[in-house]
Image: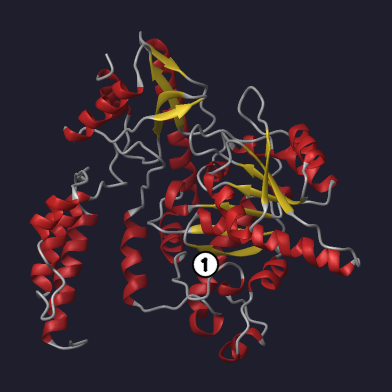
């Protein structure tokens, strides 16, 4: 196994050539999943004692494995929450891997951490957080939400200890039924209760519902979670009223903006996020609507020392790090080893400027409103609700879940689009999640045409 020399040079050249062709492909393939049996038949046994060589391994990936993965950056990928990384971010992601940068500590990755912190400071400023705010890039929203809630509970524990009060039998977190599934997952990992608060007729969590949930909670509420753009319908909670109640009760406010908080950068939707500036922690996923590659979640704290107290790991071999005053990203979340996953976003922002990002996000919001208007005009289609952001939910009158699934399967089989059914209030629906600047009105209109 050679790390240098002719073999390594040829291997790197081949891999980079494939990466270049894929990144610059004029028409991103949509592709489709394959069965395990088909993949086993087509790929064969690639892991062997003697190896199969770089060319053959790359061929297996390019011609068998990659076509069995749906491209989340395809302009007709409209399910879940797509991705749309810029070419700058994609290219620099290769640099991050090639540079062997360790992003866990300032000592080992000062330059990378500095650049990541520049992005985090910009985001904190956009969200109205104080200049002292800071954070870290983690793998995704699930880890970001869990890390924030761990910090919130640690602050509540410390307050109890400092005031000489007994710890409660149970801790609890309040969130709405529309909150992301990762909140319930985090609560299960932490062994705390989830107290559901009802949403209003618009699907928004409001302060009065949070106040009632806190009053009725059997356990001690240590955090309230507001959602800045729900995954299914893109609904933004009434964050300002939720924040007021959280502050009145001395409870940590976490804003889960994994998908939607990026829209705070756009002039037309910024007003929807009033109250974010009062949050104790927030997350936003750049691999969703900030045009970075997987995987990256920006986790920000109003008071980073609280996160340091909750997450800093102690060990003899780490003393040289933990006993210094350096900014070590691994002290801010549930992680130790970490990739400098914020660098592709830093590079893309440095290349294109923040105004390009504002324009791209605003454009997606405008496109969502146009397709919502088009749905209203078309017989047989019904808009579920007016879109807050770039998710458009609608239904085809008279269709069952099986009808939706058959239609979705046909679109993918024909390589026209990837649009999977969802549900709302117990009924099947369809939804467009619009992220990519390459998702044109024409693409959306053509998909709607197939619903006739």
Residue 433 at what x, y percent from top left? Answer: 41, 35
Image quadrant where residue 396 sits:
top left
Residue 122 at what x, y percent from top left? Answer: 58, 58
Q: What element carries label 1?
A: helix
Image quadrant where residue 10 sits:
bottom left
Above or below, 293 relative to 164: above
For this view, does 339 lie left or right of residue 94?
A: right
Q: Can I make out residue 201 in this image? A: yes
Q: Quadrant of the N terminus?
A: bottom left
Image quadrant where residue 412 sits:
top left
Say how many tags the image has. 1
Q: How many other residues sit within 10 Å of disc 1, few (<14), some (14-19) or many (≥20)?
A: many
In front here: 21 or 193?
A: 193
How is this picture coloured? secondary structure
Residue 293 at what x, y percent from top left? Answer: 37, 56
* Residue most extreme to the right: 164
In front here: 68 or 400?
A: 400
Residue ID for mark 1: 116
Above or below, 314 relative to 125: below
* Residue most extreme to the front: 169
Q: In which quarter of the image is the C terminus?
A: top left
Above or below, 227 relative to 307: above
Residue 394 at what x, y percent from top left? Answer: 42, 21
For this view, does 251 lie left or right of residue 356?
A: right
Q: Can I make out residue 370 in this image? A: no
Q: Which residue is drawn at 60% across and 36% down?
A: 177
Q: Residue at x 31, y 68 (%)?
A: 94
Q: Residue at x 44, y 26 (%)?
A: 393
For this view, does 243 lie left or right of residue 248?
A: left
Q: Residue at x 36, y 41 (%)?
A: 436
């Amino acid at each position: 196994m050679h790390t240098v020399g002719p073999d390594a040079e040829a291997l790197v050249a081949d891999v980079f050539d494939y990466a270049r062709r894929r990144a610059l492909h004029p028409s991103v393939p949509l592709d489709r999943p394959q069965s395990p049996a088909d993949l086993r038949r087509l790929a064969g046994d690639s892991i062997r004692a003697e190896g199969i060589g770089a060319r053959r391994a790359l061929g297996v990936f390019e011609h068998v494995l990659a076509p069995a993965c749906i491209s989340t950056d395809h302009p007709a990928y409209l399910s879940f929450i797509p991705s749309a990384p810029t070419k700058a971010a994609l290219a620099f992601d290769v640099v991050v891997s090639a540079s062997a940068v360790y992003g866990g500590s300032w000592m080992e990755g000062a330059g990378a951490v500095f650049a990541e912190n520049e992005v985090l400071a910009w985001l904190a400023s956009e969200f109205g957080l104080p200049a002292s705010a800071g954070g870290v890039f983690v793998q995704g929203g699930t880890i970001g939400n869990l890390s924030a809630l761990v910090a919130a509970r640690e602050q509540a524990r410390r307050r109890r200890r400092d005031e000489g009060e007994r710890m409660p039998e149970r801790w609890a977190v309040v969130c709405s039924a529309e909150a992301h599934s990762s909140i319930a997952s985090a609560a299960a990992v932490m062994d705390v209760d989830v107290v559901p608060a009802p949403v209003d007729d618009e699907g928004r969590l409001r302060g009065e519902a949070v106040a009632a949930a806190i009053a009725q909670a059997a356990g001690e509420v240590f955090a309230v979670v507001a959602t800045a753009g729900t995954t299914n319908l893109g609904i933004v909670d009434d964050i300002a009223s939720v924040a007021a109640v959280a502050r009145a009760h001395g409870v940590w406010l976490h804003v889960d903006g994994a998908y939607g908080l990026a829209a705070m950068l756009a002039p037309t939707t910024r007003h929807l996020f009033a109250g974010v500036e009062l949050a104790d922690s927030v997350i936003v996923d750049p691999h969703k609507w900030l045009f970075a590659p997987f995987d990256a979640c920006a986790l920000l704290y109003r008071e980073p020392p609280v996160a340091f107290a909750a997450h800093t790991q102690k060990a003899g071999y780490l003393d040289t790090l933990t006993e210094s005053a350096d900014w070590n990203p691994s002290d801010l979340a549930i992680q130790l080893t970490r990739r400098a996953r914020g660098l592709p976003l830093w590079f893309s922002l440095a290349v294109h400027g923040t105004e390009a990002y504002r324009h791209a996000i605003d454009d997606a919001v405008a496109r969502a409103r146009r397709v919502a208007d088009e749905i209203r005009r078309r017989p047989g289609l019904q808009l579920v609700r007016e879109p807050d952001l770039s998710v458009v939910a609608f239904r085809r009158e008279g269709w069952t879940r099986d009808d939706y699934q058959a239609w979705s399967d046909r679109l993918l089989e024909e390589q026209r689009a990837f649009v999977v059914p969802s549900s709302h209030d117990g009924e099947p629906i369809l939804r467009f999640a619009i992220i990519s600047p390459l998702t044109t009105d024409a693409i959306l209109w053509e998909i709607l045409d197939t619903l006739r």
